[in-house]
Image: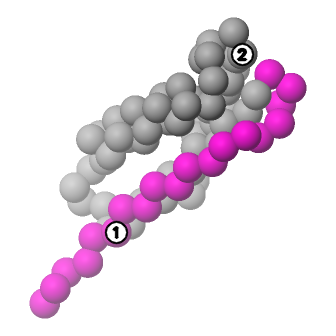
């Protein structure tokens, strides 16, 4: 089964995945990426005005195969 690595980036931090995940195909990679990104949203501080997250997926050769961007923006309406 192919192994994929999901690196996370914020404006100030980079977390490189050294362990990876065994996933059978790109559909499974996409589902895993959605689960990771939704977990990030649940854990965000409500005090943030703006936060950007990027997850970049690498295959076993190190080639990037998928990228996801999550941006949360809070704007006052007054």
**Residue 25 numbered mark, or none:** none
Circle 2 — which element?
loop
Residue at mark 2 to residue at mark 1: CA–CA distance: 35 Å
- Label 1 sits on residue: 73
> Residue at horizontal 73%, vertical 33%?
58
Look at the picture and state if 2 lies above or below 65. above
Query: Residue lying farthest right?
Result: 61
Query: Magenta stretch?
Result: 60-78
Mark 1 crowdedness (10 Å alpha carbons): few <14, some 14-19, many ≥20: few
> Residue at horizontal 46%, vertical 32%?
31
Mark 2 crowdedness (10 Å alpha carbons): few <14, some 14-19, many ≥20: few
Among numbered discs 2 and 1, the one appearing first in the sequence: 2
**Residue 2 numbered mark, or none:** 2
> Is 45 or 54 nearer to us in this picture?
54
**Residue 19 pos. (x, y %):** 65, 15
> Is 68 or 72 nearer to us in this picture?
68
> Is 54 or 32 nearer to us in this picture?
32
Q: Quadrant of the C terminus?
A: bottom left
Camera-near label (2 vs 1) is 2
Look at the picture and state if 48 lies above or below 8. below
* Relative horizontal placement of residue 46, taking residue 32 as reference (left or right): left
User: Is 61 covered by the magenta stretch?
Assistant: yes
> Residue at horizontal 31%, vertical 61%?
48
User: Looking at the image, how many numbered discs can be counted on the residues?
Assistant: 2
Query: Residue lying farthest left?
Result: 78
Query: Residue lying farthest bottom?
Result: 78
Instruction: Indicate the quadrant where residue 22 lies.
Output: top right
> Residue at horizontal 55%, vertical 31%?
27
**Residue 28 pos. (x, y %):** 53, 26
């Amino acid at each position: 089964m192919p192994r994929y690595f999901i690196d996370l980036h914020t404006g100030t931090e980079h977390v490189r995945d050294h362990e990876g995940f065994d996933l059978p195909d790109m559909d499974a990679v996409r589902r895993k990426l959605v689960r990771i990104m939704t977990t990030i949203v649940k854990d965000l501080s409500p005090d943030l005005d703006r936060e950007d997250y990027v997850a970049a997926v690498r295959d076993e050769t190190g080639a990037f195969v998928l990228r996801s961007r999550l941006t949360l923006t809070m704007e006052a309406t007054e």
